[in-house]
Amino acid sequence: MLHNVDGSVRTLVLDLDTSKARKTVVDDDARRLGEILRAAGLAYVEDESPSGGRHLYVPLQEPLTAAEARQLVEALGRRAVSLDPSPHQNVVHGCIRVPGSAHKVGGHQRLITPLTDAYGILTRRNPASAVAALRTVLAPELHRLEQLRRTQERAAAATAATYAIAKGSTASPAPMAGSERPLRAVARTGLYDTSRYASHSEARMAVLNHFSACHWTLDQVRAGMTDQFTGLAALYGTKTDRLLPFEWAKAQAFTAATAPPKDPSQRAGKKTAHKYDTSSTYPTGGSPEPAVQPSQYSIHQLVNDLENVLYATLDYKLMERGREGIHLRFLIRAVLAYMRTMETNILDVGCRTFALALGKSHATIARLLPVLERASAGILTRIDRARGRNADTYAVQLPDQFQQLARELTWRKGKIHAIRPVFRVLGDVSALAYEAIERGRHSPTTADLARTTGISRRALTDHLAGMEALQMIRRHHGRWELVATTNLAHLADRLGATEDREAQLTRYRKERAAWHAWLDRHLLPQLDEYELYDAEADEHWLPPIEDEDEYQRSFWNAARQAA
């Protein structure tokens, strides 16, 4: 039994089960978890079952409550797909099969750790300081679990209130658990639906077709097989080097043959006004001929000048609008980021494009865009109204009253961002504080950040502490500076922000398909074949991109396609 009569836990047990992933994935998870435990200064005992599962025992000098132990095990489960947290989720019946015990399939649990070492570890046990270090290492996963718990509690309370009003009952259903996309689960665990895929080969090809349709490269697939998608490597076994290039070529040929045809105007090599709000950014309702676009150099210079105006005057004007002002400040940043990435000063994309970039509802963006137009003092101007598949078209320019100011100020280092995925979880205040530290000419103090961001010192202190716990920033001699070794993309994955963005992208694809279907029924001309919605796209996710410029360009293209 894992719990004492008072519910306390003296030994954390990590149960890696072959029913949740293939044996090679279990072995890889055991190695990864061992590295995490050793990095935190925790010693552990390991054994192996006849079925191929693993148990890691972490003895503790000071007992943990059942809730604390469950939280740590569930956080570790975010790092290892084969980890079964159920023994620590049941205070009454949670138990584990210890080394030497008979197994139900025959044989006994075999101790891997040398007997003398295991005896010393179980005798000395691990101090509380090592457990605290483990919490620091797992800070992103613990933060994500806390956010999920709060979301589920709010959903359960709302459901209970609805049931109580409708039926006079106070009972509420269990909160819904998150689900994982099927092909991603296959790539991670190596387990697949045998009623759909008859063999390992068919399951592998389904995953590879999926990667190919998402424009992954062979190098990205290889890198994923050594990190996040070890289940795909398990499906290959020892034949990875021989089969992967051959099957990848087949997947690319298949996706090329089944891809929808391109727009005829694009095949002809000419650019025309867009037919819907995800096409190339050109004015759609004014002139029959497309407007002449400025050069990429003039666009970048315009964005630099607008950044000077934004940080010198516009930000301070928007601070006076309170919470709405925070949303407007990020919306104007999204506009400038879009301009720089797509090298255009004409914005004719839907609200969902900016909603995806900011992690907000498209209805919120639709409400904020006209407000931003009025508050921007001529920087943002609507030049055409939305109709049919066309979105509102806005032109971005530098008004005459800001010309001199923009020229006198020095261009700032760094890139301007909308909301990076990690701040979908951490919030707008954290994003503003991080930006102020990142783009500041000197490392700021908390008082400096309060003046720069316009956020109260109390709220700012809480968010700075949260980012410090996630090792995004650190305090040095009273001043805040970035931790350069922390990868924000990896942190977003661990916090669940990447999955949230992908879910929003999938939802917008479905909404776009429904809207186009409605137009197809009620308006002419009919949709072309290349514009039809592909149901298989629902499970697509964006490939990992190391180059930030390429990442931004692919992100905006994906957002436009979904919008």
Image (spheres, rainbow, N blue to C red):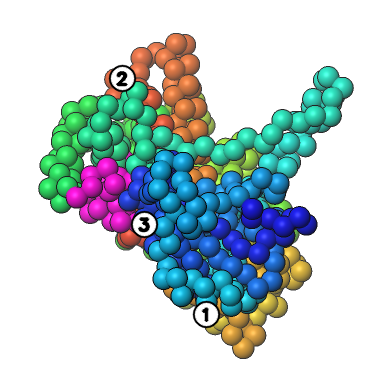
Residue type at tag 2: Asp
Residue that numbered label 3 is attached to? 28
Q: Is residue 227 in view?
A: yes
**Residue at the image point whose x is 50% and y is 27% from the top:** 511
Q: Is residue 477 above or below residue 355?
A: below
Residue 548 image offset from top left, x and y in percent: 36, 60
Badge 1, how many Cα within 10 Å: few under 14, some, many 20+? few
**Residue at the image point whose x is 50% and y is 68% from the top:** 44
Label located before the other in sequence (2 or 1): 1
Q: Secondary structure at mark 1?
A: loop
Residue that numbered label 2 is attached to? 528
Residue type at tag 1: Arg
Horizontal side, residue 189 vs residue 170: left or right = left
Label located before the other in sequence (2 or 3): 3
Badge 3, how many Cα within 10 Å: few under 14, some, many 20+? some
How far apart are the two marked residues, 3 and 1, measured between alpha carbons?
Answer: 44 Å
